[in-house]
């Protein structure tokens, strides 16, 4: 892939390449993300792993305003809060509807059922969905503590879909979307790290100084379960798109 007028570098990690693209701002990064999606679709990509939160919002705006057609594509989301159904404005299903699905319909959209009566059964069913629809391109953000999806520090790299007890730092970070911190769910169903790593291509986006330390650990630190995103060093095809602030601590 060739990106014109963009700053990008290739980080060699034990015979594998992590492509790191540094941009001026989120809008520029979102446009590059759109270019990659377009290329993958032209090459036959059918299934897209999607993320929520503030990080991919502009990226989804770019998709909405594009001429890309997803009516024969499938989406699989990373996670959902336990206890919220799709009609709740704080649920991730609602988020995806508002920020993408209402404007760009897919053939099928899969998200975990946060209201499932049997969560053990739900996580097994979600693993089956992922296996039945191999993800061609997975979108990721990164938490300030290095989490991907809701896989908090200490999560085994071998885990698949599971129920997560959210850390206080994640609850606090997500509280900006709720009336108060006490309203933030304490658990989520999340695609596991092993599930994420099955994806053919991974795009991780990060914006702002508050992500700089986690980005540095992910790219330049050791691979450790203490910083879940560091496992991406072991994947064959990772594209990291970060703004100058998020890249500020990189050597």
Image: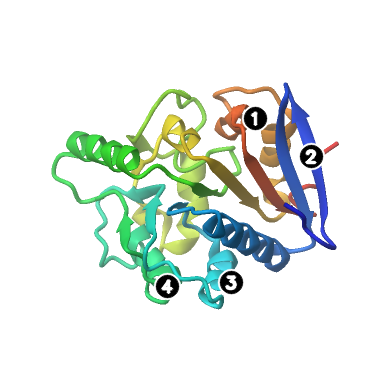
**CA gap, disc 2 to disc 1?**
12 Å
**CA gap, disc 2 to disc 3?**
25 Å
Which of pointers 3 and 4 lies earlier in the amino acid sequence?
A: 3
Q: Which residue is mark 3?
A: 62
Quarter occupied by the C terminus: top right
Residue 201, x across and y down, in percent: 56, 43
**Tags 2 and 1 touching, CB below 8 Å:** no
**CA gap, disc 2 to disc 4?**
33 Å
Q: In the picture, residue 215 is in which quadrant?
A: top right
Q: Say which mark, if any, is on residue 233.
A: 1
Between label 2 and label 1, give the one nearer the viewer.
2
Which of pointers 2 and 3 lies earlier in the amino acid sequence?
A: 2
**Which residue is more in the foreground, 28 or 221?**
28
Which of pointers 4 and 1 lies earlier in the amino acid sequence?
A: 4
Q: Which residue is mark 2?
A: 10
Q: Say which mark, if any, is on residue 104.
A: 4
Number of disc labels: 4
Which of pointers 3 and 1 lies earlier in the amino acid sequence?
A: 3
**Tags 2 and 4 touching, CB below 8 Å:** no
């Amino acid at each position: 892939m060739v990106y014109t007028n963009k700053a990008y570098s290739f980080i060699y990690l034990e015979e594998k390449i992590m492509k790191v693209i540094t941009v001026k701002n989120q809008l520029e990064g979102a446009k590059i993300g759109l270019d990659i999606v377009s290329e993958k679709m032209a090459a036959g990509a059918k299934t897209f792993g999607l993320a929520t939160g503030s990080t991919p919002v502009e990226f989804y705006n770019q998709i909405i305003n594009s001429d890309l057609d997803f009516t024969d594509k499938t989406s699989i989301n990373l996670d959902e809060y336990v206890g919220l159904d799709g009609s709740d404005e704080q649920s991730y299903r609602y988020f995806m509807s508002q920020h993408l699905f209402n404007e760009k319909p897919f053939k099928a959209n899969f998200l975990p059922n946060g209201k499932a009566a049997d969560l053990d059964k739900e996580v097994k069913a979600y693993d089956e969905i992922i296996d039945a629809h191999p993800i061609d391109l997975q979108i990721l953000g990164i938490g300030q503590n290095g989490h991907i999806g809701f896989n908090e520090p200490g999560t085994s790299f071998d885990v698949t879909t599971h129920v997560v007890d959210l850390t206080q730092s994640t609850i606090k970070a997500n509280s900006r979307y709720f009336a108060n911190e006490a309203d933030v769910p304490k658990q989520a169903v999340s695609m596991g790290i092993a599930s994420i790593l099955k994806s053919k291509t991974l795009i991780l986006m990060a914006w702002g100084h508050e992500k700089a330390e986690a980005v540095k650990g992910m790219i330049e630190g050791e691979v450790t379960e203490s910083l879940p995103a560091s496992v991406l060093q072991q994947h064959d095809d990772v594209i990291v798109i970060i703004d100058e602030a998020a890249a500020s601590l990189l050597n």
